[in-house]
Amino acid sequence: MGDSFAAHYVSGLGANINRLQANIVEYTYASCAPILYYYPYDRLDCVRFNRKALDVILEADIKTVILSGRWSDYEVRGFDGLQQTIATLRALGVRVFVIGQSPQFPTDVRKIAFFAKRQNLDDTSWPIAMDPDINERVRSFTKGATFIDPLKFLCSAGRCAYSDRGEFLYFDYGHFSSAGATLAISKYWPAFGKDNALPKTK
């Protein structure tokens, strides 16, 4: 559940189907925070969309909800609503995961690759254009949920890979491509097996 930074995981689900062990329902709307009580004055459809989320969860008998979004867009309004959302979902008996902010680059990764090639740079990682501490701030509003920080899996020392084995991991400045979504899910998407554990890191 979330905005386009939740939807961008969907294209990687198929390649990881053997480890997911769950039926997955996508409930996303562009630029709509995965916060039940979030009120964007310029996107009233988002209000209606989020209000319907609880009906969808109850009607589909959903047991686990994963919240993901472009948290850097919502911080100015504060994350109190995120904590309230988690509390509401937990009251329904739902287990909650929150996926933090994934990497965002200063421009389209194809432009970065073009620049890197002109500079004869072999490294396919680049500094991110965001405050890496945002995920710690989001985490502080996720009591009762399991928090996942994508930067810990995809980045090192403030640099994140933008391509892998000749394939771009993003289709713009930060939304995963199919290759990127496949990689991200394999690294940190919640596994709904017997122990509901995250995959081990190497």
Image (cartoon, rainbow, N blue to C red):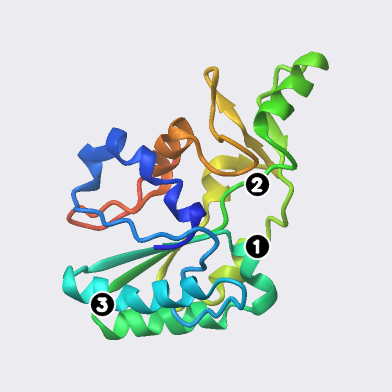
Q: Amino acid at mark 1?
A: Ser
Of labels 2 and 3, the one closer to you: 3
Q: Quadrant of the C terminus?
A: top left
Is residue 80 shown above or below 163?
below
Q: Amino acid at mark 2?
A: Gln
Asked whether the viewer can see residue 157, the reply is: no
Looking at marks 2 and 3 on the same chain, the residue that comes earlier in the sequence is marked by: 3
**Decide: marks 1, 2 in contact (CB < 8 A)?**
yes
Looking at marks 1 and 3 on the same chain, the residue that comes earlier in the sequence is marked by: 3
Q: Which residue is mark 1?
A: 72
Give SS at disc 2: loop
Number of marks in picture:
3
Asked whether the viewer can see residue 112, the reply is: yes
Q: Position of residue 131 (x, y in %)?
A: 72, 57
Disc sitting over residue 80 in the figure: none
Q: Amino acid at mark 3?
A: Asp
Give SS at disc 3: helix
Q: Which residue is mark 2?
A: 104
Q: Residue at x 71, y 17 (%)?
A: 122
Q: Quadrant of the N terminus?
A: bottom left
Q: Residue at x 60, y 44 (%)?
A: 174
Residue neighbourhood size for the residue with mark 2, other residues' Cα within 10 Å, grouped as few (<14), some (14–19), many (≥20)? many
Residue neighbourhood size for the residue with mark 1, other residues' Cα within 10 Å, grouped as few (<14), some (14–19), many (≥20)? some
- How far is disc 2 from disc 3 in space, using C-alphas? 33 Å
Looking at marks 1 and 2 on the same chain, the residue that comes earlier in the sequence is marked by: 1
Give SS at disc 1: helix
Q: Which residue is mark 3?
A: 55
